[in-house]
Image (spheres, grey):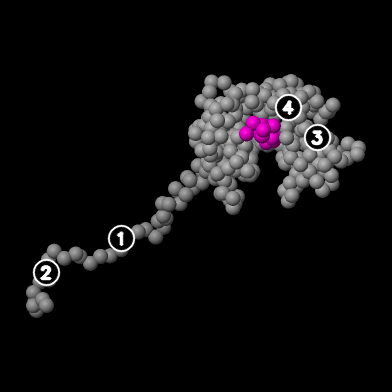
Amino acid sequence: MTPTGAAPPTGGAPPTCAAARPRDAQPRSGGFKMLRILILLLVLLVVALTTWQDRYRSTRWHEPLYVAIYPIAADDSPATQAYLAALDVERYKPIDRFFAREAARYHLDTGEPIRTRLRAQLQDRPPSRPADAGLLATALWSLRLRYWAWRVSGHAHDPEDIRMFVLYHDPALTPSVPHSLGLTKGLIGVVYAFAAPTMNGANDVVIAHELLHTVGATDKYNLADDAPRFPDGYGDPAQRPLYPQLTAELMAGRRMLAPDHWEQVDSLDEVVIGPSTALEIRWPQHAR
């Protein structure tokens, strides 16, 4: 207790009080928020312009599109490693020949619309899209994939109009693979394939299918059961009798054998590009 009449002890903290602030002062965080929004809008604008430019350039078809194929081992199986070690430039030539054949049917300006180029095996794998990804998560995954593709590819001196990253699985370990995909944004494809010579033809069909996704083609099958959609998903919807279909449409990927029965095709020899797909990728509409 302080004695009566004694001065209060010195050195203690003085009473605190709120600092005076003008009544019209505003938090400074609002300006930073607007700056972040402006930067985001600029990024989206650049992405949109780049996508439009890629779309225009990739569907002119006055000269070949160079398709870089990057093989990736999806597992550590010796069979997968042996398969990748045996890959050479001839392995993907059936894809080039398929597009040349279909280009001739549609009287395309260039007789060689696609030129595949085998790149060195990558050790890095692309980011996976979450199975339950919503719209925002899918958009963020797409940006991560494009950044990953930019980081691991494009180091060759020759051009790469489209980049296809093919992940090969040992079928003995993985008898069923995830769905492949092709993105128009960035002209990127991610293909899940099998590391077995007997599956080369089927792998080519998937690569060609996803390749056309990158230049604007859409699927021609029913999402509910994977059945080719009539008429766009049939190789020849005017064929008589209609079944069994002799060919499959590329963006359906399956050949109709009966109204309720279809099968996967084994090679591009059984596949055509239908009129609807040709229209989407800006090919002429006068097929032979």
Numbered disc in front, either 4 or 2: 4
Local SS, label 1 = loop
Q: Dot 1 corresponds to which residue? A: 19
Which residue is more in the foreground, 275 or 173?
Answer: 173
User: What residue lies at 52% left-to-right and 32% top-to-bottom?
Assistant: 122
Label 4, label 2: how far apart the Cα atoms are: 96 Å
**Label 2: how many residues lie within 10 Å, few (<14), some (14-19) or many (20+)?**
few
Q: Dot 2 corresponds to which residue? A: 9
Local SS, label 4 = helix
Q: Main secondary structure of the magenta part?
A: helix
Quarter occupied by residue 69:
top right
**Label 3: how many residues lie within 10 Å, few (<14), some (14-19) or many (20+)?**
many
The label number, if any, that marks residue 123 in the structure image: none
Residue 53 seen by the camera: no
Label 2, label 1: how far apart the Cα atoms are: 25 Å
User: For the C terminus, which image quadrant?
Assistant: top right
Kind of residue sitting beneath label 1: Ala
Numbered disc in front, either 1 or 3: 3
First in sequence: mark 1 vs mark 4: 1
Local SS, label 3 = loop
**Label 4: how many residues lie within 10 Å, few (<14), some (14-19) or many (20+)?**
many
Left or right? Give the position of 213 relative to 142: right
Residue situated furthest bottom in the rendering: 4
Magenta segment: does it hold 197? yes
The label number, if any, that marks residue 247 in the structure image: 3
